[in-house]
Image: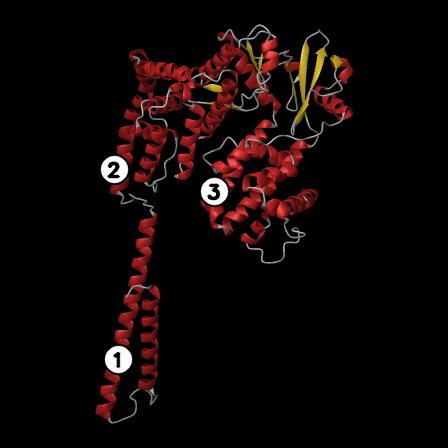
Amino acid sequence: MRGKRIRHVMRYRVIASTIARYGFGLVSDEIGSRRRNIFAGNKTTNEWHMKSLGERICLLLEELGPTFVKLGQIASTRPDLIPAEILKELETLQDHVQPFPYNEVASIIEKELGAPIESLFKHFSITPLAAASIGQVHRATLKDGNDVVVKIQRPDIQRLIETDLEILIDWARLTEGAVEWAKHYRLREIIEELSVALLLELDYSLEARNTEKFVELSACIDYLYVPNVFRGYSTKRILTTAYIDGVNLSDDEELKRQGLDLKLLAERMTNAIFHQILVEGIFHGDPHPGNVMALPDGRLAMIDFGMIGRLSASMKHHFATFVIALRNQSTRGVIRAINQMGVVPDEVDVNKLYSDVDELREKYYNVPLNQTSIGTAVSDLFNVAYKHRIKIPTELTLLGKCLLTMEGVVTALDPNISIFDIAEPFGKKLLLERLNPKRILQNISEEIPEYIDMVKEIPLHLKQLTRMLSNGRLRIDLESPQVTMLLEKLDRISNRLAFSIVMLALSIVMCGLIIGTSIMHSQSILWRMPVIEIGFVVTIFMFVLLIYSIFRSGRF
């Protein structure tokens, strides 16, 4: 625990000094620290004032290292949580890291696989193919002659990321308790949600399972290839898959040199992504050109399944409803889709929401399908959700990111492609399947056992209710902010009434004492004390206190 505290303090100092240097030292003031920020150093230079907030955040994240870069990349998939101007900059975040030495690669492989690297591989490239913030990739050949790529996790990266996440969550908790904007935007909830996604990326065995799942799903698409996983050479920190000799989809010159049809590649990629989304319900979360390649025979190859999205049957239906409603210029249909896809808060201004969706509809009214961007449409929907604090489920925000990325790739290959033209038949097919009598009967038959169980439990619940009523133990719990406020006001009113009654009673007693002393012609009738004078002072004090409380309440 002592070592952990020391790591936290040292890392916190680095984080705090870097934050201050990029012009965010004000954050420490906002959370209540009135003392001079010892991490701030000199005044922020004019260089940072010339950059936008999003640019400064990106530069800050890149300098703070892999945890923050990956969090930024994951955050770029959450347009319902992050403002659009910052989101645009986060999408440009890149891993600028040096590869770690080969001797550390060999040490990790020997520790994870239980044998020296020379006995496991016939050939292992010393120079990595690529290096990223979490791991790096080497090309190798197995003893049986299979060409593979081996992804190795960076040494001590898990400890660094866990330390950073603990610091960030603690900082978010502190900030939420002191700063209104942090509480309003649920800062701790955002960081915790992004942290879970990042920790999942550290487990290569999960990526191996995802890859195997897509190998199985791609079997029904003859133009899509996913490389096999070599389980005997894979662990939580190492992932070994078949090597792919393909061409990056952004390399137009090489694609043309090999005689590949760019229009066909664009169509195949679009169909493959929509098949994954609307048919299989599981899709590649980041289909950028580095993760989708063209093979010499015209097929597409997908790699890197560390980030995938899943859609339930109901979510697939809601998304299809949104696409068709947008296509048909139906404001009510779009609103219905938003309602079904997200969690609409009770305090949302329905009229304003309808107005914003009408603006969104007008944007796409009478626009030719080949000029309509489905990715931008989904992004616009998420902007409306962010504006009205409608929380969109994570899988749908990842879907929006997937569509935007895919659309950028395919329109670069074929500028005239219409994503809506390809998506609409999938959506209509999904809706027709949902209305299929056979599917309806199947759904009903699956729910019948649950309904039977509910009917069986009715007599038991009635018996319990009758017993509680007869014993007078029926309890109803109501919880509402308005009810609580009303009870507090009633409590204050009753206290003031009681105070006034006591003061009135005291006044009556004082009147009695004054009359009594007048009749008896004596100064006081109680132990010859100046009761009248004391009572008069107490009464005046209580009267002033009551008037003050009434004026202070602002209601008189």
Identity, as a three-letter code, of the amino acid under mark 1: Val
Instruction: Report, in whole angstroms, how far the alpha carbon at label 2 lies from the one at label 1.
Output: 54 Å
Relative image position of residue 72 (x, y in whole percent): 57, 34
Observer-nearest residue: 149 or 356? 356
Residue corresponding to mark 3: 186
Q: Nearer the viewer, mark 3 or mark 2?
A: 3
Tag 1, which secondary structure?
A: helix
Q: Is residue 23 above or below residue 402?
A: below
**Rendered residue at 60%/50% (across/down):** 25
Instruction: Report, in whole angstroms, how far the alpha carbon at label 3 lies from the one at label 2.
Output: 44 Å
Q: Are marks 2 and 1 in contact (CB under 8 Å)?
A: no
Identity, as a three-letter code, of the amino acid under mark 3: Arg
**Rendered residue at 55%/41% (across/down):** 52
Residue 367 in view in this figure = yes
Observer-nearest residue: 373 or 470? 373
Q: Is residue 49 left or right of residue 423?
A: right
Tag 2, which secondary structure?
A: helix
Q: Is residue 495 above or below residue 236?
A: below
Residue corresponding to mark 1: 509
Instruction: Report, in whole angstroms, how far the alpha carbon at label 3 lies from the one at label 1.
Output: 58 Å
